[in-house]
Image (cartoon, rainbow, N blue to C red):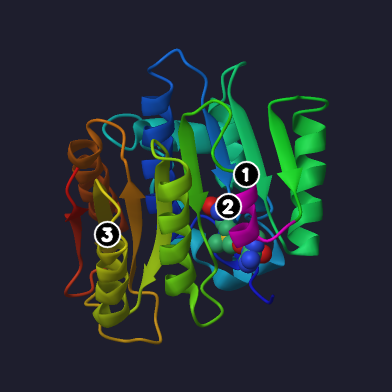
Amino acid sequence: MNYRHAFHAGNFADCMKHALLVWMLRALARKSAPFRVLDTHAGAGAYDLGSEEARRGGEWQAGVGRLLDIVEGPLADYAALVREAGAPASYPGSPALVGALLRPEDRLVCVELHPGEHAALRARFRARFRADPRVAVHRRDAWEALRALTPFPERRGLVLMDPPFEQPGEFERLSAGLSLVSRRFRGAVQAAWYPIKHRAPVRAFHASVEAAGLRDVVAAELWLREPTDPARLNGCGLLVANPPWGFEAEARGILSALLGRLDGGETGQGWAITRIAEE
Ligand SMILES: C[S@@+](CC[C@H](N)C(=O)[O-])C[C@H]1O[C@@H](n2cnc3c(N)ncnc32)[C@H](O)[C@@H]1O
């Protein structure tokens, strides 16, 4: 396990994933019934943007660094949460963003396998949510956890799968994970992040999700240049199964606003909301 998110925290891919995640959590909180979030690849929870890793990668300046002054429009809620969490000194990971949006009755379960990232997340949550019964942090394998920790006792909530794509077979594991949860936990909102380097593996992933029989699936995608170079992270996608009501319209606004800000001047950039499976 070589992947360290500290090099990439706050980059365009985090901005896209987290802005959509924040909107979905707000949508879940519109109903009074409690929800749970299972974050299967949780990472360290927060990242120092002045660290050697963040400075070496330099990715956040071209990502969240361009969004921090936003106070209105589709990105305002996300930008405010990121500022409240300490940006530009530090950037909140998915566990910190979810933690900030939990109501007293909601729950967050974080799963992280890397010993160092797990220890950092645990320490952070111990300091922030001391003896808080709403938050649990596990050191275990994501794919095993999906089986062990679903369905949720609350019968509603969101599963976020955000693998590092450092090993071959990640698209296949993601597709199998989505399929497993859809069988075990029908109502779950599932959000799965994936890289767009070139189109062929993404098309195969969408086809496998459709072939697995998942219903009501939408892919939100953003790319900063024509995705033709398989060696570069040209764009990324968030595949959402069972999206909260209104997701497609809201995601259009979020992606369009993001591309407006993150435009690096390269040719062939764009975004899309694509329905992969009907309800
Ligand atoms: C892209 S990062 C997660 C970022 C985080 N979700 C966020 O949005 O802030 C992926 C994380 O998955 C962890 N990881 C990799 N393989 C895993 C596995 N099989 N089970 C659990 N965690 C894993 C890595 O150590 C890394 O911290």
Residue contact between numbered discs 2 and 1, judged by CB atoms under 8 Å: yes
Establish whether ligand 1 lies closer than 8 Å to the Cβ of label 2.
Answer: no
Element carrying mark 2: helix
Q: Please name the amino acid that badge 2 sits on.
A: Leu
Residue 146: assigned label: 2
The C terminus is located in which quarter?
top left
Q: Nearer the viewer, residue 118 or 261?
A: 118
Magenta span main SS: helix
Q: Is residue 259 above or below residue 204?
A: above
Q: CA distance from mark 2 to mark 1?
A: 6 Å
Tag in front: 3 or 2:
2
Magenta span of residues: 140-148
Element carrying mark 1: loop
Residue contact between numbered discs 1 and 3, judged by CB atoms under 8 Å: no
- The outermost residue toward the top is 32
- Residue on which the image places disc 1: 149
- Residue on which the image places disc 3: 221
The N terminus is located in which quarter?
bottom right
Q: Please name the amino acid that badge 3 sits on.
A: Glu
Element carrying mark 3: strand
Q: CA distance from mark 3 to mark 2?
A: 24 Å
Residue 2: assigned label: none
Q: Residue at x 43, y 36 (%)?
A: 22
> Which sits earlier in the primary sequence, circle 1 or circle 3?
1
Q: Please name the amino acid that badge 1 sits on.
A: Leu
Q: Nearer the viewer, residue 99 or 137?
A: 137
Q: Is residue 35 left or right of residue 85?
A: left
Camera sees residue 98: yes
Q: Is residue 272 above or below residue 20?
A: below
